[in-house]
Amino acid sequence: MTQTRTLESNGASRAEHLHGDGSCQRPRREVVLIGAGHANVEVLRRFCAAQLPRGVAVTLITRSGSELYSGMLPGVASGRYDLDDARINVGALAGRAGAQLIIDDAIGIDLPRKAVLCRLAPPVPFDRLSLDIGSGPTAGRVAGAEMHALRVKPIEGFVPGFDSMRHRLRERGYRGRLVMVGAGAAGIELLLAVEHRLRSEARRAAADPDGLTFTLLAGSGDILPGFPARFRRTVRRVLEDRRIAVRTNARARMLDGHQVHLATGSPIDADEVLWATEAAPANWLAETGLALDREGFVRVDEALRCVGQEDVFAAGDTVSFDPCHLPKSGVYAVRSAPVLAQNLLASWTGQALRPFRPRSSVLYLLSTADGRAVGTRNGFTFSGRWVFWLKDRIDRRFVARLNASHDGSDRSPGHDRRAGKHGSVHG
Ligand SMILES: Cc1cc2nc3c(=O)[nH]c(=O)nc-3n(C[C@H](O)[C@H](O)[C@H](O)COP(=O)(O)OP(=O)(O)OC[C@H]3O[C@@H](n4cnc5c(N)ncnc54)[C@H](O)[C@@H]3O)c2cc1C
């Protein structure tokens, strides 16, 4: 006789299968997903519809039962979206996929014993592992940044942090100097959203919207490194129109609560600092024994398998893709999901491992928080209200698709013809 026992882990539950004699037997095939990142949630969505091989049990270990979709975070900051518009109900998705959900922090991987180590829960055994824990900003490497700056990641911390910032500025009559450290797409989109929200609130409170100043710090010689020149120019014009000052070659070295000190040049006065620098990997990965690149990201081969590992796969911002450089961008995480879903099950479904072949050109849409957006694809740049309309539609559909009950129209892992038609970015 087999029955199911539920284990509590920080409010979430996990099942083990017990035999009549009380001995505990793991289901034969444990697929464990760490992190409800873009790739793993898409894997779960595919598992909702797929007939998983007999004996396969899926477990998701992640920090929260709901996630804010990063592509819509600037819209939440600008006030365009409610939190619920941008929320992915990870718990419900896991439930529909028949997966156990463990709300916890993974803090290690015991490769020889094939188990994930968690902060609170007991070790979680795996036969196949999918690591999709994203990345964080490099704040930990800059003295004072964790204490004095509002970091964009983890995303769940940004919204309450921004609410507190709005409160402080309201108390000060909307007078203050705001500095955004990080001039990549996320930093710029978020700063435009913050500027729009705060200056609108100042106007509504009959305060001078120019009592607030905004400065964007780019660590290199231009904003938006890696993007086409025309896209950069168009976004620069938007920043100028919105009276956002741009400082290039301004790499933050230290924050002290009043100023941002730079590697070179005079410090910048700041009452409020936001932080959205380039991606950094989780520190604990260094202890796992997984092969890492020089920066500490997990090296994967073309099948998304961790280099030197048979059973461990990874995707999203946390990986360094051996075949070619991939930008840290949600689109690549989502695009890798069909491959990841298939490869996690391949040895049990008789399918060969499938290579991930990322497209070199993707569509990137950056909202300017005034009902417009700027986009780029294949070297072309375009902007306007219709671009925002497109972004809004794609983003809402992405979230809705993950939150929707299964409608029977889905396909099995690895056979999604719609792959790529998601998110603010697609190729
Ligand atoms: C404001 C903003 C806007 C953006 N807009 C876009 C855009 O329009 N298009 C685009 O392509 N990219 C965009 N990005 C980049 C995009 O967010 C990232 O590239 C993407 O989130 C990476 O996805 P991921 O799957 O690697 O992980 P994430 O989506 O970051 O998810 C990581 C998951 O892992 C969980 N986790 C982390 N550590 C642990 C742990 N130790 N144990 C358990 N769980 C853990 C987290 O809770 C989370 O569920 C934007 C980023 C920001 C900040």
Image (cartoon, grey):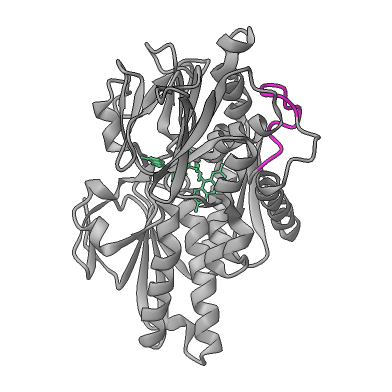
113 left or right, relative to 158 = left
Q: Is residue 329 left or right of residue 109?
A: right
- Image quarter of the C terminus: top right
Most distant residue in the front direction: 21
Name the residue nearer the viewer: 320 or 36. Answer: 36
- The percent position of residue 204, horizontal first and vertical second, equals 56, 88
Rendered location of residue 145, percent (x, y): 25, 57
- Image vertical order of residue 4 relative to residue 105, above or below: above
Q: Position of residue 372 (x, y in %)?
A: 67, 61
Could you tell me if residue 126 is visible in this image?
Answer: yes
User: Which secondary structure class fits the magenta region best?
Assistant: loop
Nearer to us in this view, 238 or 327: 327
Residue at 31% in and 46% down: 138
Q: Residue at x 37, y 70 (%)?
A: 178
Q: Which residue shows up at 59% across the image and 29% down it?
A: 337
| Left or right of 346, for residue 390 | right
* Residue at 70 percent of width and 23 percent of height: 51
Judge whether residue 412 is colored magenta.
yes
User: Foreground: 405 or 397?
Assistant: 405
**Considering only vertical position in the picture, is 135 above or below 305?**
below
Q: Is residue 243 left or right of residue 89?
A: left
Q: Which residues are magenta?
A: 411-422
Query: Can you tell which quarter of the image residue 107 is in?
Result: top left
Quadrant of res 86: bottom right
Q: Is residue 355 visible?
A: no
Q: Position of residue 304 (x, y in %)?
A: 50, 20
Question: On the rendered image, what quadrant is the N terminus found in?
Answer: top right
